[in-house]
Amino acid sequence: MAREFSITPKSVPPVSSEYRKIATPLPAPETVPLLESLHHTELRAMQGQPPVVWHRAEGFQVYDPAGNCWIDWSSGVLITNAGHSHPDVIKAIKEQTASHMIASYMFPNAARARFAARFSELLPEGHKKVFLLSTGSEAVECAIKLCRTHGIKVGGRKKNIIVSFEKAFHGRTLGSQQAGGIPALKEWIVNLDAGFVQVPFPDGFRTTDTSFDFFLKCLTDLGVSGPNVCGVILETYQGGSAAFAPVEYMQQLRKWCDGHKALLVCDEVQAGFGRTGAMWGFEHYGIVPDLSTWGKGISSSLPIAAVAGRADVMDLHPPGSMSSTHSGNPVCCAAALASLEVVVRENLPAQAARKGAVLLSRLKAMMAKHPEIGCVDGKGMVAGIACVKPGTNREPHPDLAWDVVERCWHKGLLMFMPVGFGGATVKICPPIVISDEALEESLQVFEQAFAEVAAEHKLEATAR
Ligand SMILES: Cc1ncc(COP(=O)(O)O)c(C=O)c1O
């Protein structure tokens, strides 16, 4: 699936609207030296996104140095819930740097104390301890460690199994990739830890049996017994598709974990801070996990992540034994606090719910028209469109998905490369603050681009 976008400029029809402007070939010729320099200096793995040189990003728009401008449907990668360069976030970063307190390791600093207190205040009862880190993967690693530590404490060393889900993504480090459910991403791991097992995710599309009994059956088939499970970790919705589990399923999972003294971990790295139409994604399930992991939209800007959860679990390790060099960096904390206050003040969860209802209904209407759309998932301001080959049994259609992303890029609508099963899911996740007008305009662009590309693929198929 190693497709990538060419960096040789290609002429495309010009675009000029209030929110989008494309006035050069793409990528803009003046940006090619920079793209070439990165291709030369960086590893290949960093290539793959539409080659837009991000020069400035504000609100829901991204600009390149040539003045081309896109409506952003990526939020970076679900980072900018409160919008790019929110004035409050920029102000907080400026004030924090001006105070000459920009790094303090684990030594206490006021910005860390303020953000930790506010985040904790908003979290549900019994889930109030927080540990600030730098990346989502790091937060997941920490959650794995806490599950294992807790398992050993309450059930001995045999209680070490971490159950997670097929097709899940939890990060790119050794532990987080083993908790992930994408076999290709684990090919490099020589000594797979037998304590990580995956069961199908009840998405209703790729896994049609969404009953909790199926979860239990899969564990039995894998030879896993409940008393040996120390933790169950899942993305609140699967990032590769934007699919949620059924509410019933999650409530039964919550009870099952309680019954077996296994910790339930919700990976909220993509879901938190209003994205799904609720402040925290797990609210949709009417449950509170034992641990949660956070990142991306936590600051709408600088790198910061977190683990939150039950005090008795979070406090299992003694002073000094769980830390990270940049835990709670003061500039990142100042940015995170400013972003969090925007999320609360502007009620971004409600905004995401309202705009998301429009987004989802339009995407579902597209699905009714296009047999190339196998499934539309999502809630709030996140959605995934699974592209399939018409006439097949849901066979993924990555080429179509890539062509849609490319066509949108040419029309002034920016998305990241397709993700998910078979690399065939087009993911839609604009900043929550996108205006109603820009959402409407971008939906029209998307509908048109999809229809064009689908028609071209149909023509090609009949010509063959
Ligand atoms: C659900 C989920 N967990 C963890 C991660 C890893 O986060 P990071 O890239 O900050 O390490 C990601 C990143 O995409 C994610 O989507």
Image (spheres, helix red, strand yellow):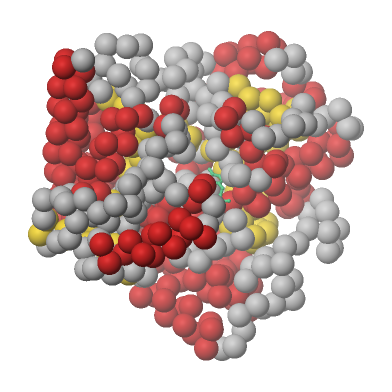
> Quick one: quadrant of the C terminus?
top left
Q: Residue at x 48, y 47 (%)?
A: 270
Q: How many marks?
A: 0
Residue 426 coordinates in the image, percent (x, y): 33, 37
Residue 49 coordinates in the image, percent (x, y): 39, 48
Q: Quadrant of residue 323?
A: bottom right
Q: Is residue 450 left or right of residue 316?
A: left
Of residue 135 and residue 14, the one placed in the foreground of this image is 14
Of residue 395 and residue 270, the one placed in the foreground of this image is 395
Residue 442 coordinates in the image, percent (x, y): 19, 48
Compared to residue 171, the image places residue 216 above or below, namely above
The reply to whether residue 378 is in sight is no
> Quick one: quadrant of the N terminus?
top left
Q: Residue at x 60, y 22 (%)?
A: 199
Q: Is residue 358 left or right of residue 58?
A: left
Q: Residue at x 33, y 52 (%)?
A: 7
Q: Residue at x 52, y 60 (%)?
A: 41
Compared to residue 379, the image places residue 228 above or below, namely above
The residue most toward the right is: 156
The reply to whether residue 12 is in sight is yes
Residue 89 coordinates in the image, percent (x, y): 42, 73
Of residue 110 and residue 55, the one placed in the foreground of this image is 55
Q: Quadrant of residue 158?
A: top right
